[in-house]
Structure formats: C-alpha cells, structure tokens
Amino acid sequence: MSPPDAEVTELPSSPGARLRREREGRGMSQQQAADALNLDPAILAVLEANDFAALGAPVFVKGHLRRYAALLGMDEEELLLAYERSKQHLGEPTLVPRARLEMAPVRGKPRWPWVVGGAVLFVVASALIAYVSENGLPWTGAATDESSPSSAASTTSSAAAPADAATGGVPTAGNAGDVAGTGATPANGSPATNGPAPFSSGTPGPASAPAPAADSAAAPPAGQVNLQLRFTADSWVEVFDGSGKAVLYDLGKAGSERTITAQAPVSVTLGDARGVAIIVNGRTLPPPPRAAGEALARFSIGADGNLR
C-alpha cells in the first residue's frame, strides 16, 4: 500500500474506515460479511483499506461499496460521496484489478511468425530440390548443348585425319570403284577398263571375237611408275612412294583393281600375292618372290619398271 493510501486509511471519514467501524459495531467478521455478499474476503479487506486501485475501474469499486453499505445498513450515497472525495488522494486506477495484474504471467513475443516463416521456407526449399533433381540445372544443359557441335566437329576432323594420312590423298577402294563404274578417266590418264559397255539398238551384226585386254598404257612421267593391281582374291595392299609417303592402304576385293602413279622407287606389300596380278607401265610382271609356304610378299619397283 502506498503512503497516500495509508494516510487515507487513517482518516475516520474515509469509506474504508466507516465500513470497518460499522462491521465491527455489528460484531461481524470479514469472513461473515464476505459470505453474505458472496465475495472473496480479500475484496472486503481491500475496500476497508481504501486500496480501491486493486479492484480496477471505478465502476467496480462503486458496485462493491453499494452492496457492502446495503449489507451494513449504511447510506449508500453518503458512502459514495466519501469515495469521490478520497479519489483525490489515490492514483488513477486501471481497468484490470491490480491483484490480477500481479498474478498475470509475463508474456513474451509471439512465436507464430517464426513458425509460419520456417514452414514456408521448408516448402520452397523442398520444391526447389525436387525440380533440380527432376530437370537438372538449366545453365548446365545450355553449356552442354553449346559444346556438342564443336565436339562433334572435332571428332569428325580427328577421324578423317588418319584416313587422309593413310591414303595420302589417293582414292580408296570405294572411290576407285566409283571412277571405274562411271567410266571416268583415272588420275593417271589411262582409261577405265571395267566400265559398263554402252547399250546399242538395232539388228545385231555378225558375231566377232572379243578383243584381248591391252596391257599397254601411256608412259608415265620421268622418275614415276604406273602400277596396276588386279585382284583375283581378297588381299591387303600397301604402297609407299619413293619419299615414304603412303599412296595406297586398303583391302582389295576379288574382281577389283587399283591403278596408281607414284614416284619411284615404289614399295609394295601384298597380303596374298597369289591372288594379285601386277602390271607396271603396261607390262605384266611375274609373281613377286615370297617365302616358301607364305602368301605375304614385299617388293619394290624401280624407275625402269622392274621388281627389286
């Protein structure tokens, strides 16, 4: 109780002092009065001590004073007038009784914003992880797409380089076949011998014997050799010119032929020399020497067109 309250309590004209004198004069205890009013005895003790701020707003204080005065047979209006005069010595009461304020627990800041924010963050993170697991990162896919054409071009260039080095720019089996099939003139200037015969219409003439195949060919430039290989069996063939450059490296199929012109001396390797006819500068050469029981043959051809 504050000092002003103590001073008011000691005044005989205060509402609390009047109530206490009247109750004691009737020989009634606080407990008995509280039971009659159906109130807590602590409320009567607060009224008799003039601690009206503990009861909250003035409307509650006036209600208790009226009931207490009626129980003791006192003039209610006179008691309320004394209460109004005593309010000048009291602090401004609150709407909530002071006793309840003292008993109320200390409330901290609400936590629900943190809970809601954490839940939203968890949902967003889960959705992002699921999207990345399903579709991957967008910028990595774009980088892969941009690098794919250059990788493919590099692979194609690297794959074509060995083939060019192996053939030395000379047409391979497929190209030679295409030249022979179309009847075009090969690089050495000699006409193709296995091109399709032209179609002729009208009444056929008298039968004539086919002309024998000519072994003669145009003379090659000085220091070079015109080499023609006719395959009656499948055989690997390797041909290098005098500078060591690969001129032909391929598999000759049975029934096909290869014709090249290269700088002498020309080095030749045949996988199966028994199935290959060798024609140099239009002249058919004898089979090349080879080891007994072996099909492989290695030999060279000089500028004079002879085997070495």
Image: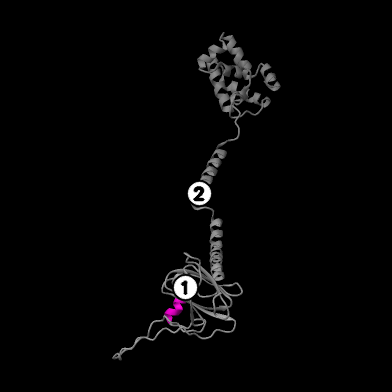
- The location of residue 203, given as percent across then percent down, is 28, 91
State the colouring used for the structure image. Answer: one colour
Check disc 1 and report its element: helix, strand or loop: helix
* Extreme-left residue of the structure: 203
Disc 1 to disc 2: CB gap under 8 Å: no
Q: Is residue 135 above or below residue 245?
A: above
Report, in whole angstroms, how far the alpha carbon at label 1 lies from the one at label 2. Answer: 51 Å
The disc at residue 133 is 2
In this rendering, the label closer to the viewer, 1 or 2: 1
Along the viewing direction, whichever of 208 and 50 lies nearer the viewer: 208
Indicate the quadrant where residue 114 lies: top right
In-image side of 4 versus 283 (left or right):
right
Residue pictured at 65% horizontal, 23% vertical: 86
Considering the whole magenta stretch, tell me its main secondary structure: helix
* Extreme-front residue of the structure: 292
Looking at the rendered structure, the kind of residue marked 1 is: Ala
Q: Is residue 231 above or below residue 217?
A: above
The crowd level at tag 1 (other Cα within 10 Å; few <14, some 14-19, many 20+) is: some
Q: Is residue 17 visible?
A: yes
Q: Is residue 280 magenta?
A: no
Residue ID for mark 1: 173
- The location of residue 199, given as percent across then percent down, is 35, 86
Looking at the rendered structure, the kind of residue marked 2 is: Ser
Comes first in the chain, label 1 or label 2:
2
Q: Is residue 252 visible?
A: no
What residue span does the magenta drawing correspond to?
175-182
Check disc 2 and report its element: helix, strand or loop: helix
Indicate the quadrant where residue 79 lies: top right
User: Dividing the image into 4 quarters, which one contains the N terminus?
Assistant: top right
